[in-house]
Image: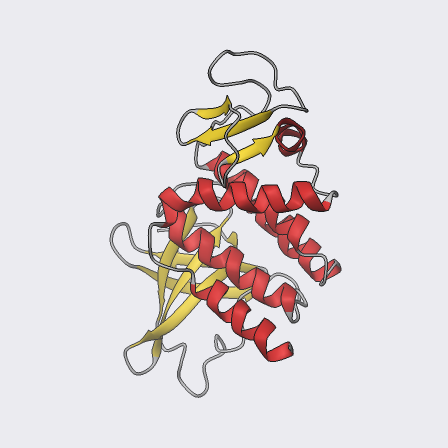
Amino acid sequence: MIENWQRGFVLHRRAYSETSLLVDVFTEDTGRLSLLAKGARARRSAWKSVLQPFTPLLLRWSGKSGLKILTKAEPAAITLPLQQIALYSGFYINELICRVLEQETAQPQLFQDYLRCLTELAGTPLAVEPVLRRFEFQLLQSLGYGVDFLHCAGSGQPIDENMTYRYREEQGFMASLIKDNLTFYGRDLLAFEQRRFDDSTVLQAAKRFTRLALKPYLGSKPLKSRELFSQHILHLK
């Protein structure tokens, strides 16, 4: 049983029986876990408005194994004001965490990165791409993804900004003259290391890289948040 309050966020929620919710949360000290919120769908439940994505929460739950039971949930601050593209970006980040993080594995640094990501999305609602790329790189790091962006995986030589390198899963970047979807310029890799995504070309390369790197963790099942985002863009057109 959890004796102390934990800071956390709702990642996803779905109906469970006639009156309850099954809630996926991301907490500072326990990581990702699923909680049963009994009676949360009932007409007079105080949890209806509390258990919402992007609201900083204080949480308590009980249970030593299997499905834990939510016992307390209180807002720690107001809901972060995500709108339009920033809102869909927030759903994307939530889905990533649900898909790739193991249950009940503490990720205190990633929790801080997640909070920073949401805060930046709320503050810069249109310039979401650099924010998303930074979080994706932090997520990969938390998964133990140890690609070296500073040295060639084949020779160990420092990355040359003017050369091209081909990405090989679980190995890194090898100097190559082949140019395809797996090829990156050295200047892109050096920018990746510093998390500098202010250049549009680097930003596009970073998006291509994170999709390649996250694919083994995500599998072949498409992300629902990407589909929703695509529909939103089409609607705006």
Residue displayed at 50% across by 25% down: 173
Q: In which quarter of the view is residue 14 placed?
A: bottom left
| Colouring used for the render | secondary structure
Figure check: 153 above or below 215 = above
Does residue 137 appear anywhere in the picture? yes
Q: Position of residue 150 (x, y in %)?
A: 60, 21
Q: Residue farthest to the bottom?
A: 43
Residue at image location 50% in from the left, 70% down from the top: 228
Residue 219 x/y as whole percent: 33, 50
Q: How many marks?
A: 0
Determine the residue located farthest toward the left in the rendered image. 66
Q: Nearer the viewer, residue 209 or 81?
A: 209
Residue, x 68% and y 24% (percent of image)? 161
Q: Where residue 88 sits: x, y (%)?
A: 57, 66
Q: Nearer the viewer, residue 153 or 111?
A: 153
Q: Position of residue 134 (x, y in %)?
A: 62, 43
Using the rendered image of the protein, determine whether residue 79 is visible from the camera's viewpoint: no
Q: Residue at x 66, y 36 (%)?
A: 195
* Front-lying residue, 173 or 48: 173
Residue 164 in the image: above or below residue 140: above
Up-down: is 166 above or below 6?
A: above
**Quadrant (top left, top right, bottom left, bottom right) of the C terminus:** bottom right
